[in-house]
Amino acid sequence: MIASHLLAYYFTELHHDKVQQVDKYLYHLRLSDENLMDVSVRFRREMDKGLGRDSSPTASVKMLPTFVRSTPDGTEKGDFLALDLGGSNFRVLLVKVSDNGKQKVEMENQIYAIPEELMRGCGSELFDHIAECLANFLEKMGIKNQKLPLGFTFSFPCQQNKLDESILVSWTKGFKSHGVEGKDVVSLLRKAIKKRGDFDIDIVAVINDTVGTMMTCGYDDHHCEIGLIVGTGTNACYMEEMRHLELVDGDEGRMCVNTEWGAFGDDGALEDLRTDFDREIDAGSHHPGSSYHRTLPDLCVSIGAVSEDVSRPDRDKEGLVSAEKVLRGLGLDPSGEDCVATQRVCQVVSTRAAHLCAATLAAVLRQIRDNKAAERLRTTVGVDGSVYKNHPQFARRLHKMVRRLVPDCDVRFLRSEDGSGKGAAMVTAVAYRLATQHAERQRILDALRLSREQLMEVKIRMGNEMNRGLAKESHDQAAVKMLPTYVRSTPDGTERGDFLALDLGGTNFRVLLVRVRSGKKRSVEMHNKIYTIPQEAIQGTGEELFDHIVHCIADFLEYMGMKGASLPLGFTFSFPCHQNRLDQGILLKWTKGFKATGCEGEDVVTLLKDAIHRREEFDLDVVAVVNDTVGTMMTCGYEDPLCEVGLIVGTGTNACYMEEMQNVELVDGDEGRMCVNMEWGAFGDHGELDDFCTDFDRAVDDRSTNPGKQRYEKMISGMYLGEIVRNVLLEFTAKGLLFRGKLSERLKTRGIFETKFLSQIESDRLALRQVRSILQHLGLTSSTCDDSILVKEVCSVVARRAAQLCGAGLAAVVDKIRQNRNLDKLKITVGVDGTLYKLHPHFSSIMHETVRDLSPLCEVTFLQSEDGSGKGAALITAVACRIRDAGQH
Ligand code: 0WK
Ligand code: 0WK
Ligand code: BGC
């Protein structure tokens, strides 16, 4: 229109005012670098508006989420159909993707016409026609009986809520079929196909042609993260950070955004740059008032013979000839001057178009550069469209201006030779791969997901095992030993004195001095020092281990200036011990990787005393040996008298609680209560949990220092969760479901995936890239964002199961206490300690929830121990001393 207008105008008015007037007209169509930089800045602002949840409804540049999040990873394979509607040609394609190592893509396609009357007629007829073309193509290819997956390139602005659903926002490019805007084009197509009933397909994805172009080019160049179309219409898409897409949930990774930049200026943002020619074109267009930015293509269309006419003259000498031919074609009798002017008009119009494109593309490039916080951005733009491809100067002008506007970006422009249909097939192939992989991953993870019924079953079985452990006749066969601790009462506030305490068995070995005051100034003051237990002591001889313990005590007494002091000592020894009295503990078996020889079956108090004697430096009065669960219950009981259960979820896991003496059949007497150390870690050692054990659990157990033992512990506690995750990741990788199937040597290393990683990876504060840095630390340098999301999912599934299993066990404990006391409702406190419980972001809440759900008649308060079980051990020692001293008077 401009050219013809201009020329028509030229022919009428300019006959009189020579070339100057032409230049005057051309002036407004020329944009300076400042103008273009300003357009670029304005567009960037529009992008932010489009991405914002609150601002997007009024934004002209809609920034539509496409639900395309991943690019091909080379493992896609299969036959896929694709439809390509919205450009100059409507294509139906069959795309064969083979992954025999060197991924190959073969394509067959057929172009079909879309009659004008259908473009402007009734929508259902349009889709009937599309279905007709599809049927024709399937017939031709002899695949009408196959239900192939299909990717639909539908190149119009669509609101998407998922990959296979797309609501048409508004037609563009001369399409006006009614009854389609506001509808899901996938349902319209499915309906049209169903109506025919002679073939069926599985529509997996609907995408915009810019997205298809990005994917088509991304197949050859993995740097391609922008898709650009300059053809009948113009538009661009790019990979945006999820955290910027406020319209879609999730902050992890990236998603392709269809900018629909054609509408830039619809809110007047380009008013100052628009010329009367633009306004006239718009007024005469199919969609007046929308799509200013579509200045170029619409302009071309209206001159008839479309862009060729404009682009051909834009070729210097040869172009002049074309100009004359075009003008004669329009029934004019142009002079040489007319042809020069016409060529000039074409040059200026297409240059403005190329530069406007460059300005908005520059904004997209800056957005990606800033997203990556990159000094210098290296990226590829996949391009398609007849204007970009056929106009002799457009591409060069676009590239040049882009490099001028964003000199700090290395931009490669990659022409799409295969059309966006291939891209649509790749999106479908990726969606298919992701869906298949997702299903396979969920199938594997489902083995680690426990239903409420299964958890209730665990609770019931734990309850049964508790009774078997308590009962004299079944105790020996019971897996859960329910060991009497000889702790019968909790502190009554009269305790006082200085006590030493040892705390062995958790992550840290502590020596403590605990000063207990009674009466009004009732308080407990503690001094402690943490010592490491060297691996060689843990796995050496018992003598070495206990000599090391005594060495630490000596160091502590010196450190406290109490060399040679002889204080009553409470020994927290966090391993299963059979006790016949408070100051004796026969070690039944080591757990948590301890293997020191000559200890199992021995009284650890004796082993300690022997070591003290061997040192001949000080003497100690070992009054009590307690389990860390008992110490924790006491520590918390000092604050909250309702605390009658102790729970540890740390390196290992275990629980204790105050049981009715009449149920503690291993100990004489029926009066009162005694604390029972359940040693529930061994639950499952006799097969009680076999139907809940997975291959991953079996792999962890097989390679542990105590195969077949502590099965429940190995599904819950910190020493093992990392290993379970590592084994799941190995399985996923071996099946090509993760890390592109590339196994890293480091990931094969036992214990490399520490449980602390689970807590870190699941903490909401940790962005994905930090998950990636953990994976990089594990030698998984090529892990992708998707990999990180999957690793996070595996960690959460494994941790969730651990928390639920722990909750099911505890539900059995509190319900037993309630039944012991014939209460309809029990109010009780559980004292808890252990790094996993304290540091994992979700473990405690999931465990609490499970207890509440499985034992609704128990109102359970969880009290986290801040002082460790050493304090509890000292309090037990204080009580024992009080009773002993009372006994001596
Ligand atoms: C070829 C792509 C198609 C896109 C077209 C745009 O396969 O998806 O719509 O380019 O260019 P046009 O045909 O409008 O010039
Ligand atoms: C801190 C207690 C200690 C217990 C430990 C368990 O003072 O007795 O063994 O918690 O947690 P872990 O250190 O194994 O994570
Ligand atoms: C031990 C228990 C201890 C628990 C928590 C288990 O391995 O057998 O005695 O209470 O770990 O530390």
Image: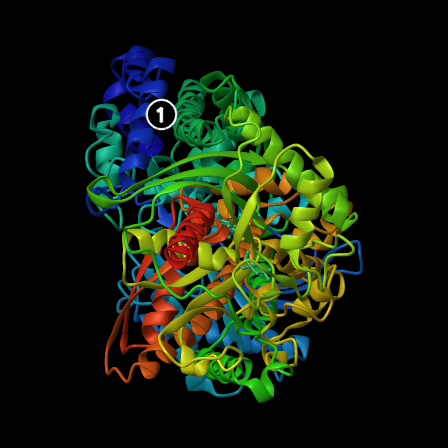
Q: Is residue 261 left or right of residue 788?
A: left
Q: Position of residue 700 (x, y in %)?
A: 69, 63
Count of number-bearing discs: 1
Is residue 661 visible in the rendered image? The answer is yes
Is residue 249 visible in the rendered image? The answer is no
Q: Position of residue 133 (x, y in %)?
A: 52, 73
Question: Residue at the spot x=69%, y=71% of the render?
Answer: 695
- The one nearer the camera, 493 or 644, is 493
Q: Quadrant of residue 16?
A: top left
Q: Is residue 550 left or right of residue 29?
A: right
The amino acid sitting under disc 1 is Ser
**With respect to residue 157, does 707 lie above or below?**
below
**With respect to residue 771, does 625 lie above or below?**
below
Give the SS element for disc 1. helix
**With respect to residue 547, does 15 lie above or below?**
above
- The one nearer the camera, 535 or 96, is 535
Question: Residue at the spot x=69%, y=51% of the render?
Answer: 607
Question: Residue at the spot x=55%, y=46% of the render?
Answer: 621
The residue under label 1 is: 40
Question: Residue at the spot x=57%, y=66% of the render?
Answer: 579
- The one nearer the camera, 333 or 19, is 19
Q: Residues within 10 Å of mark 1 (few under 14, many from 20)?
A: many
Q: Quadrant of residue 679?
A: bottom right
- The one nearer the camera, 148 or 632, is 632
